[in-house]
Amino acid sequence: MPREIITLQVGQCGNQIGGRMWDLILREHASHFQSKKNQSPDLLYDDPLSTFFKWDYDGKAKSNSGGHLPDIRARAVLVDMEEGVLQSLLKSEIGGLFNKDQQFISDVSGAGNNWAHGHEVYGPQYHDEVLDKVRREAEDCDSLQSFFILHSLGGGTGSGLGSYIVKVLHDEFPEIYTFTTCVFPSKDDDVITSPYNSILSLNELTQHSDCVLPLENQALYDMCQLVNSLEKKKDV
């Protein structure tokens, strides 16, 4: 029996990382199935894929290669208090994975790199909407295993609203595991409030998450630089 995971992307950083994650999952799954079956690159909706995606039709779809998406939907809720990144995701090659009306929560002004604004203002304001959309995703699961939260700790939405959502999930779904992947600001971060946002977020995460997987922003940047340099060497 598959064990489903619902992903919650919060803030600009969380949604940018999430966008890359969905594309990579589809490409790796299609590549594995093609090499294993030695067939055309059709994307089979099997147990591993059903962990992150839901399907309503006959069980097969075109692969993601060439910019074509399968007729599946991500098990996800996307939250950002600025619309820019969410709109970019909708217009991208993976935009078909999401239902804007059922899975998106957005505002226009942002949290202004302020943990308190995200946690104490946007949190209560969007509490019911977040809970409603998460419950809808949970109803489509046969055996929900965990929530997977992607966010950063340096800004306002990812840290403040992100940690608020973690608490809501802990209170409303106490039997479901909550895993948090959070991006810490680098040492030379130019947002003056980022250390405070991070400390306040950590206090919430340590109390309400079952597992916190920290990532350091500078380390991610260094890895991207290394990959890009290796790819350039291959092209030479």
Image (cartoon, rainbow, N blue to C red):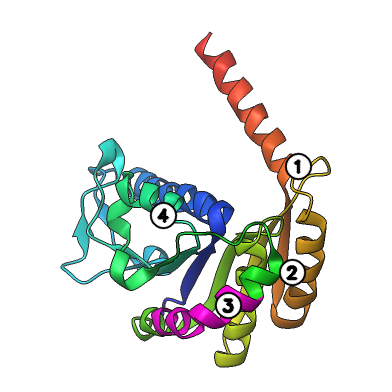
Q: Nearer the viewer, residue 114 or 184?
A: 114
- Find the magenta span and give its range: 120-134
Mark 2: give few (<14), some (14-19) or many (20+) Cα within 10 Å. Answer: many
Q: Nearer the viewer, residue 50 or 155?
A: 155
Mark 4: give few (<14), some (14-19) or many (20+) Cα within 10 Å. Answer: many
Give the residue at x 51% y 83%: 127
Assess whether mark 1 and mark 3 are in contact (beta carbons under 8 angstroms). Answer: no
Mark 3: give few (<14), some (14-19) or many (20+) Cα within 10 Å. Answer: many
Q: How many marks?
A: 4
Which comes sooner in the sequence, label 2 or label 3? 3
Task: Look at the image and tell me in which quarter the N terminus lies.
Answer: bottom left
Q: Is residue 174 visible?
A: no
Q: Which residue is mark 4?
A: 86
> In the rendering, at what x and y percent does residue 191 appear?
74, 48
Between the residue at mark 2 and the residue at mark 1, the CA separation in whole angstroms equals 18 Å
Name the amino acid type tagged 1.
Asp
On whether residue 121 falls in the magenta region, the answer is yes
Above/below status of 153 relative to 135:
above
Name the amino acid type tagged 2.
Ser
Furthest residue to the left?
58
